[in-house]
Image: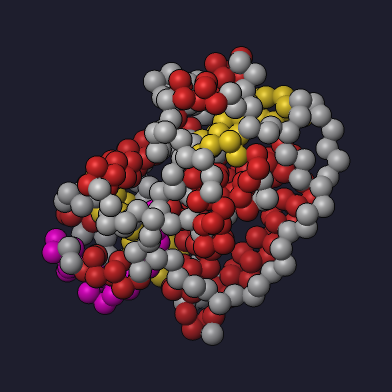
Amino acid sequence: MKRSKLTIIFLLFIFLLSLAGCGQQTVSLPTLPQPSNTQSTMAYPLTITNYDQQENLVSYTYQKAPERVVVTHPGATELLLELGLKDRILSTVAPYGAPLDRLADQYAKLTITKALYDPSQEELLEMQPHMIMGWSHQFSSHAIGEVKTWQERGVATYIMPSTLTKTNPTLETVVYASISDLGKIFNIQSKTDTYIQHAKDRVSYVEKKVKDVPQKKTVLVLQDHYNGTFSLYDSHYLISHLIDIAGGKNLCENPASFVGAEKVLAFDPDVIIFVTSNLNDSTKDLTDKEAIDNLQAIKELQSMRAIRKGDIINLPFFTVNNGGIRAIDGIETIAKSLYPERFK
């Protein structure tokens, strides 16, 4: 990979963390049936309430299901692909790492915006979309344009709830809510209702396995910025809620972005969730061994108990900041890593 692209990816990670405050293991859990393809009979016009860039509630009325969708959040792209809406995606941004295996071929065939991660307003206008989905911070006059402006042009906007910074996100308010909204917008409610129920079944399975743990293991969610600074993910990130469901306790209660090693060393977690990225190849995630080796190689942190013992969970940046279909996978990975004896 060219160094310029590595720099872009690294700067993207820093930028996203500064705005909001925070290899995946294979989990052997019961396989649930796939969602039904039966469509609902939702009548249009249909009004959906979402947000603007200031996180105020904003409504938009759809006269029909959008056919030309531009996506500036790769987690939203994976969600559309998962729901069988590939043909509705006009263009999207490059993934932040490796797409899910089951979606990789579809993602590779999508049209990628000229700007890999943040298209210009001019590029968006040229594409003439019916709908734009993305991060909350992107909908500003200095980025892709304000929600009000796009709606006045007759273009629907949808801010992914996971990108809001003023709330403590949960599965209900972030993951299930966005899937439900898309079911209504694209008139596939029976499919999304089934999908949500299967997700809830998987979560219930994990909760039953960990509900009576005598003492919750403590967790710290850590990202390395490769320049001597780190970020710790607190309750303003969905990952903190996922840890709670998985039977853990996030030790970080306040935002801590771009802090030095001394701030990290103030914590003594049982386990560290290491938010990883592959700077050598953005199309691949780090293996668990590579992630552990990388964290244990940081001299300033080698005294930490969890790092010495190798009690490290590798979660890719794309998974932690996905806000969509990876959330349930994340819960299962965390729970099995914290309490492997309960999932034998």
Report the front residue among 4 and 153. 4
Residue 160 is drawn in which quadrant?
top right
Residue 171 can be seen, yes or no: no
Residue 177 is drawn in which quadrant?
top right
Provide the residue span drawn in magenta: 299-317
The residue positioned 68% from the left and 33% from the top of the image is 67
Rendered view: 290 above or below 328: below
| Residue 312 shown in magenta | yes
Residue 342 can be seen, yes or no: yes
The residue positioned 48% from the left and 68% from the top of the image is 333
Which residue appears farthest toward the left when viewing the image?
299
In percent of width and height, residue 225 lies at 24, 50
Name the side, left or right, on which 122 lies relative to 47.
left
The residue positioned 66% from the left and 30% from the top of the image is 49
Quadrant placement of the C terminus: bottom right
The residue positioned 63% from the left and 32% from the top of the image is 68
In percent of width and height, residue 259 lies at 22, 47
